Amino acid sequence: RKEVEQDPGPFNVPEGATVAFNCTYSNSASQSFFWYRQDCRKEPKLLMSVYSSGNEDGRFTAQLNRASQYISLLIRDSKLSDSATYLCVVIRDYKLSFGAGTTVTVRA
Amino acid sequence: NAGVMQNPRHLVRRRGQEARLRCSPMKGHSHVYWYRQLPEEGLKFMVYLQKENIIDESGMPKERFSAEFPKEGPSILRIQQVVRGDSAAYFCASSPNPENIQYFGAGTRLSVL
């Protein structure tokens, strides 16, 4: 079983729509959780950290459920510039484990 | 404050040649991590280094691959006798300590002909 699994999508949504997707992780000892964003053929960039209490950053809301070992990301009022691959990242000790990514395409 | 710098951005090698990929971490960061991303796949951890020490190389192929992070100068990922399957994007990340967020360089895209 992969350490981090994500729905690959693609999610194809119109501008202004809300899109949400999850990832699951297999190791209950995982310590920290993040969403990174990767644009085509570029480096991953940190989008936001994920906390158990849930956290928002503008139009983005992240949630962590430790009991069920899943992490979610919700994007409200989608913009064209939100089109990217979203990577779920789990840290245990120093090692980042990446999901394969969820592709989101926002169309005009 | 420059970010993580990787060079070259693109590297073309013929089968059997050596590839040397360089990574300079962000200023103040002494922890460096290398990842590989094969086409259409996610990033995979390769190796974690701190100045002059390899901390974890559990993700490195057993043969032909090596990494170093000398006291002076960038971290180097070295691939000897490259094969077509080595074609990938190689990303370097750095952090000030292992518990902190890792910041990524722009990557080196290796193409093996």
Image (spheres, grey):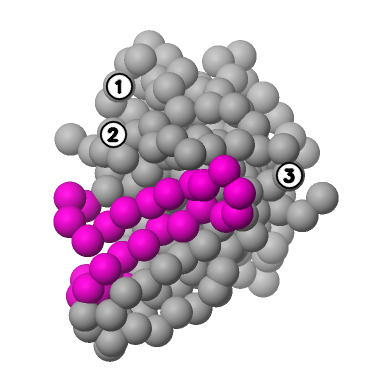
Residue position marked by numbered label 2 in the rendering: A3
Q: Which residue is mark 3?
A: B27
Q: Chain of mark 1?
A: A
Q: Is residue A82 visible?
A: yes
Kindly report which numbered mark, 3 or 1, lies closer to the viewer in this rendering: 3
Viewer-side residue, B52 vs A78: B52
Give the residue drawn at x 53%, y 38%: B51
Residue A38 screen position, x and y as percent: 54, 57
The answer to if B67 sits in the magenta stretch is: yes
Q: Secondary structure at mark 2?
A: loop
Give the camera-side residue of A56 and B69: B69
Give the quadrant of residue A79: bottom right
Q: Amino acid at mark 3?
A: Lys
Q: Secondary structure at mark 3?
A: loop
Q: CA distance from mark 3 to mark 1?
A: 32 Å
Marks 3 & 1 on one chain: no
Mark 2 vs 1: CB contact within 8 A: yes
Q: Residue at x 34, y 83 (%)?
A: B13
Q: Chain letter for mark 2, please.
A: A
Q: Helix, strand or loop at disc 1?
A: loop
| Labels 3 & 1 near each other (Cβ < 8 A) | no
* Cα–Cα span, label 3 and label 2: 31 Å
- Looking at the rendered structure, whether the residues under marks 2 and 1 are on a common chain is answered as yes
**Residue A87 visible in this rendered orientation of the protein:** no
Disc 3 crowd rating (10 Å Cα; few below 14, some 14-19, many 20+) is few
Write down the residue under mark 1. Answer: A27
Question: In the image, which residues are magenta?
Answer: B61-87
Label 2 crowding class (10 Å Cα cut-off): few <14, some 14-19, many 20+?
A: some
